[in-house]
Amino acid sequence: MTERALYSDGGVRVAPQKKKAKKTDALAFKIVTYVYLALFLLAVLVPFYVVVATSLTSYEEIMSKLEFIWWPKKVSFEAYKTVLIEDRLALYGMSSLLRGFLNTMWQVIPTMLGGLFVSGLAAYAYSKLRFRVKNVLYVITLATMMIPGAALTMPTYLYYDALGWSHSVLPMMIPGLFGSAATIFFMRQFFAGIPTDLIEAGKLDGMGYLTMYVKIMIPLAVPAFLAQGIFAFVGGYNNYMGPMLYLLDNQMLWPLQLALGQLQAQYGAGDQAVQCASAIVAMVPLLIVYLVCQRFFIEGVAVAGLKG
């Protein structure tokens, strides 16, 4: 009996050789996993390192060498000074990136907050309320997610142009205040896991539907709202096509991504340090958001997935 042995009471135990083989397989699996993760980490961090190193290299050093520069001989912040203070698109003493960041904040945050509130309200209705054609309306809402955004670019532009909105921020702000189908779907999955008894208790206390949404559903769904808020903020922060269509002729209203694109076009591929410095400056706010909200983001996505 090589692989198994009997206990004195008749039970079966695994032979030491087989236990050792299992431990060896588990160790090999861990090694392969960690090697793969290390390679993936290098693939992510090396490009980021190159961007940082290039942004700290002076223009003279870049132009004087033909080979790739892994680290500058002398760290220089000239590129950051150019991007934040002396860029060619600066107006009224403010650099285009700083002005673009401020424009992005007031253009994205109100839309994000309003859209989250309305999307959560629709998700609450689809998950907890009973009314006719509820399922039909929900299917129609989800069907809008299947329409490619590029197919709607020209029709929506013509529509907003007919309204007189084509040279303003309204096309990028007003539609977002009515929520999004993806957020409604996500929040409905979360709300479906909240006990309906809480709604019934709210009714017994004399609460209306809106009051129950504000006082019961929103406090319980804070992690899910934060997760969707991050998605909405990142989407608005990285939006380039919308500002290109509606704000290209109004430099004072340029958000960060449009200002970043125009700034890099002004300096061209010759000044690589400015190109990289501007990318780093634009990236820092998103990194801060992820670092601060990472725990809430993971919790919101995980809990919604379990409840769904």
Image (cartoon, helix red, strand yellow):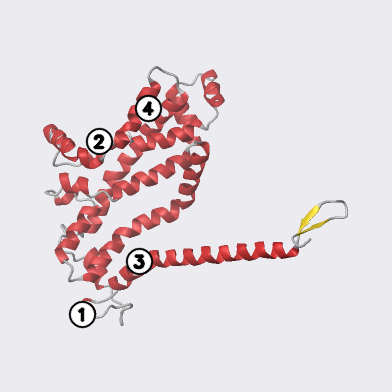
Q: Secondary structure at mark 2?
A: loop
Of callouts 3 and 2, which one flags the residue occurring earlier in the amino acid sequence?
A: 3
- Given residues 108 and 134, the one toward you in this image is 134
Q: Secondary structure at mark 1?
A: helix
Of callouts 2 and 4, which one flags the residue occurring earlier in the amino acid sequence?
A: 4
Give the vertical position of 273 relative to 249 (above or below): below
Q: Amino acid at mark 2?
A: Ile
Q: What residue lies at 74% left-to-right and 60% top-to-bottom?
A: 3
Classify residue 32 as left or right of residue 46.
Answer: right
- Given residues 308 and 115, the one toward you in this image is 308
Outermost residue, top side: 132
- The residue indicated by pointer 3 is 48
- The residue indicated by pointer 1 is 60
Relative image position of residue 86 (x, y in whole percent):
19, 66
Relative image position of residue 8 (x, y in whole percent):
88, 55
Other residues around mark 2 within 10 Å, as few (<14) / some (14–19) / many (≥20):
some
Of callouts 2 and 1, which one flags the residue occurring earlier in the amino acid sequence?
A: 1
Marks 1/4: CA distance? Answer: 60 Å
Of callouts 3 and 4, which one flags the residue occurring earlier in the amino acid sequence?
A: 3
Q: Secondary structure at mark 4?
A: helix
- The residue indicated by pointer 4 is 138
Classify residue 131 as left or right of residue 78.
Answer: right
Marks 3/1: CA distance? Answer: 22 Å
Q: Amino acid at mark 3?
A: Phe
- The residue indicated by pointer 2 is 174
Mark 3 or mark 4, which is nearer to you? 4
Marks 2/4: CA distance? Answer: 22 Å
Mark 3 or mark 1, which is nearer to you? 3
Classify residue 242 as left or right of residue 299.
Answer: left
- Given residues 36 and 85, the one toward you in this image is 36
Of callouts 3 and 1, which one flags the residue occurring earlier in the amino acid sequence?
A: 3
